[in-house]
Image (cartoon, rainbow, N blue to C red):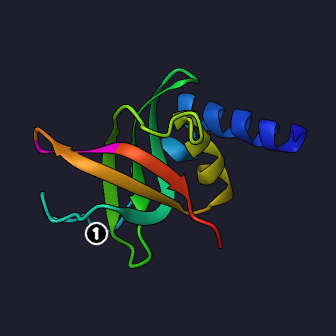
Amino acid sequence: MIRAALLVVVAMLAVACGGPASTAPSGPTPAPGSLVSPVEGVPVHIDAEGFTKVTGFTVREDDGTLATFAMGTLENGDQFPPNHLSEHLAGGTRIRVFFRDENGTPTAYRIEDVLP
């Protein structure tokens, strides 16, 4: 439990301090409007204000495609709080993102752990 908490803190510090997690990921990006919900992949970038307010994130799908999302209000935020993304970023573990188009921006409304 302490190790998991430490991983979260380290990942959040890397994001907040401009560490490797805050560099722009590379890979193909889908054409606007071509994404289909849900998307599965590994988080490779998190945009955050401080340690607790995630504003957006990028996921690398299995084929290398990068999908970037704005963070909306999560319908399952009590099971998957937005800052839980940092654990997936640090561990390279997969998530499933359900999203809707909000003014041309893919906006996450539900995020789930993908079990191996």
Circle 1: is it few (<14), some (14-19), or many (20+) Cα within 10 Å? few
> Which residue is rendered at x = 33% and y = 70% of the image?
65
Image quarter where the N terminus lies is: top right
* Numbered disc total: 1
Q: Is residue 25 visible?
A: no
Looking at the image, can residue 85 be seen?
yes
Residue shown at the point (80%, 43%) measured from the top left: 4
Depicted 13 relative to depicted 90: above or below: above
Return the residue at label 1.
Answer: 28
- Residue 14 image point, x, y percent: 61, 37
Q: Residue furthest bottom?
A: 63
Using residue 66 as the reference point, say whether residue 88 is left or right of it.
right
Of residues 86 and 78, the one nearer the viewer is 78
Amino acid type, mark 1 = Pro
Secondary structure mostly seen in magenta is strand
Q: Which residues are magenta?
A: 104-108
On screen, residue 101 versus residue 6, left or right, reads left
Q: Residue pushed farthest top?
A: 50
x and y percentages locating residue 107 in the rendered image: 28, 42
Q: In the figure, is residue 115 to the left or right of 101?
A: right
Query: Residue sitting at 29 percent across and 61 percent down?
Result: 37
The relative height of residue 95 versus residue 6 in the rendered view (above or below) is below
Specify the quadrant of the image occupied by residue 78.
top right
Tell me residue 84's x, y (percent): 60, 41
Location of the C terminus by quadrant is: bottom right
Residue 71 part of the magenta segment? no
Circle 1 — which element? loop
Q: In the image, what residue occupies the spot 23% across and 48% down?
A: 100
**Is the residue 110 above or below the residue 26 in the image?**
above
In the image, 11 versus 115, the foreground residue is: 115
